[in-house]
Amino acid sequence: MNLATVNLNLLVALDALLAERHVTRAAARVGVTQSAMSNALRQLRALFDDPLFVRGPRGVTPTPRALALAEPVRRGLATLSEAFAEPRFDPASAERTVVLAASDYVELVLLPPLLARIAREAPGVRLEVRPWGLHEVPDALARGELDLVLGYFDRLPPRHRRERLFEERFVCLARRGHPRIRARLTLKAWAETPHVVVSERDDGPTSVDRALAARGLRRTIGVRVSHFLLVPSLVAKTDLVAALSRRVAEPFAAPFGLRIFPPPIELPAGRVGMVWHERLDADPGHAWLRGVISDVAAHV
């Protein structure tokens, strides 16, 4: 039998006839007229080349062929019903691995409270975190290799969704006893002292460089690194300075002997967000995790 030629509604009628053993009651069960159910029975008889049901004093009696079809048809319809049912997600019982990409800065700020929250509410949900330091959305989201990206990004590709999580302010770092930086940080000293810059590639000015350029200045780059968490150590052991996210600078200042200064010029705030592909937008588990991340981010 070629399933492509079969009207699957006939199986719904067959299941109702097997349950009710009566044409009128089977029609009411499915929500069709008695004549429509009788027509469905004629088609079923032709389809299976068997009478399927014979008339009796109280309705219809199934033939052996109809009885043999009862359980497979019931299982098949139940499977189809599950496929069409609205998907649900129960955090407490879910078993799932979510693949995230984030910079080490975002890992430092968000992962501890996020993992604590997931451990309480969804102990079967596991995170796999991959490094991501560029200010652009990776193609791996569209390919299905990543579920979420957390961090800075400049442009949203087509068919992607985003949500802003929080803003970050920059502060300036220098080691205690720096030979050029005394009680306060002047614009001249800051611009002329070599900087640690976090960037995975040298492809243009950063927001700090653009702010300096607006004043007709440019900074000297002493070293370019790919990880935010390297910056405090490098500043502590050299005469380099840095403009760094406040949430990274403050925990490391005392242990590394660093001084924190307000920037000598106004610097734009960094905006941290999450990005996902539209194919996951309606997934209930993914939506739950996005909500948790958003709530955690609101309290960091």
Image (spheres, rainbow, N blue to C red):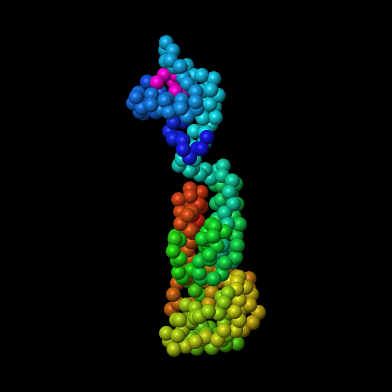
Looking at the image, residue 295 sits to the left or right of residue 201; the answer is left
- In this view, the residue farthest toward the right is 237
In this rendered view, identify the residue nearer to me: 113 or 27. 27
- In this view, the residue farthest toward the top is 57
Q: Is residue 134 above or below residue 279?
A: below
Q: Position of residue 58 (x, y in %)?
A: 42, 12
Q: Residue at x 47, y 54 (%)?
A: 279
In this rendered view, identify the residue nearer to me: 68 or 262. 68
Q: Residue at x 42, y 10 (%)?
A: 57
Q: Is residue 71 magenta?
A: no
Q: Residue at x 62, y 84 (%)?
A: 239
Q: Is residue 247 above or below residue 242?
A: above
Q: Residue at x 41, y 19 (%)?
A: 22
Is residue 260 visible from the viewing direction of this image?
Answer: no
Is residue 293 visible from the viewing direction of this image?
Answer: yes
Q: Please give the range of residues in magenta.
A: 16-23
Q: Position of residue 115 (x, y in %)?
A: 58, 54
Q: Main secondary structure of the magenta part?
A: helix
Q: Is residue 159 above or below residue 18?
A: below
Q: How many marks?
A: 0
In this rendered view, identify the residue nearer to me: 199 or 252. 199
Q: Position of residue 50 (x, y in %)?
A: 49, 23
Q: Position of residue 265 (x, y in %)?
A: 45, 81
